[in-house]
Amino acid sequence: MELDEINISIIHHLKDGRKSYKEIAADQNITVNTVKSRVSKLVKEGVLDIVGLVDPDTIPRHQVVIVGVKLASMDLVKKGEAFSKLKGVVSVSVVTGRFDLILVVFLKEGFELLEFYSEEVSRIDGVQSVETFVTYKNYNLKIPYIF
């Protein structure tokens, strides 16, 4: 799907997920039906998700950690997909540098770092090493509440 200027503008407007299609249509000088149609297509094509996100720093007894993963093989996409299915994983990125994958992981009381590594990461073969970065304060980070 090609993202033209109207699609990009609609996506920009939807960063405020409560903005009405009527307001977007008026700003873009297009019809409400055009906005509805384009949003539906963007969602169907996997370009756009409309979800409620939370600031993880505001949720008691929860924590975000960043995990760098070094793999024993170069099967990055397959391993990235496997990591993305683990409990607590918010996102996985294939990256350059000293790690092969970077994970954003959301933990909570009762499912903390030990459980994440011993119950989840241990199921994936070919993990050479991991490095954990505990976040103390996040700026501009909003994530889906996955628990």
Image: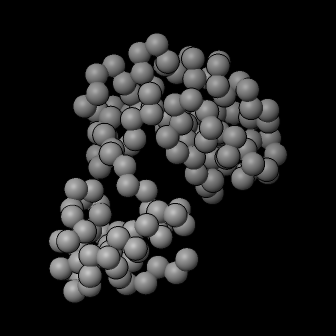
Residue 121: x and y in percent read 66, 28
Q: Quadrant of residue 53?
A: top left
Question: Which residue occupies the extreme top position in the image?
Answer: 110
- Name the residue located 61 percent from the left edge and 42 percent from the top edge: 84
- Name the residue located 49 percent from the left edge and 40 percent from the top edge: 90
Residue 18 visible, this orientation? yes
**Viewport quadrant of the C terminus:** top left
Q: Quadrant of residue 129?
A: top right
What number of labels is visible? 0
As displayed, is residue 37 above or below residue 43? below
- Name the residue located 69 percent from the left edge and 40 percent from the top edge: 82
Q: Is residue 145 left or right of residue 104?
A: left
Q: Is residue 95 left or right of residue 33?
A: right
- Name the residue located 41 percent from the left edge and 74 percent from the top edge: 38
Q: Nearer the viewer, residue 139 or 11?
A: 11
Q: Nearer the viewer, residue 104 or 38?
A: 38
Q: Is residue 92 left or right of residue 55?
A: right
Residue 37: x and y in percent read 40, 73
Q: Quadrant of residue 96?
A: bottom right
The chosen color scheme is: one colour
Residue 142 visible, this orientation? no
As displayed, is residue 99 above or below residue 108? below
Residue 128: x and y in percent read 75, 35
Residue 23: x and y in percent read 17, 71
Q: Nearer the viewer, residue 77 or 6?
A: 6
**Viewport quadrant of the N terminus:** bottom right
Q: Nearer the viewer, residue 25 or 67?
A: 25
As displayed, is residue 32 above or below residue 98? below
Question: Which residue occupies the extreme front position in the image?
Answer: 33
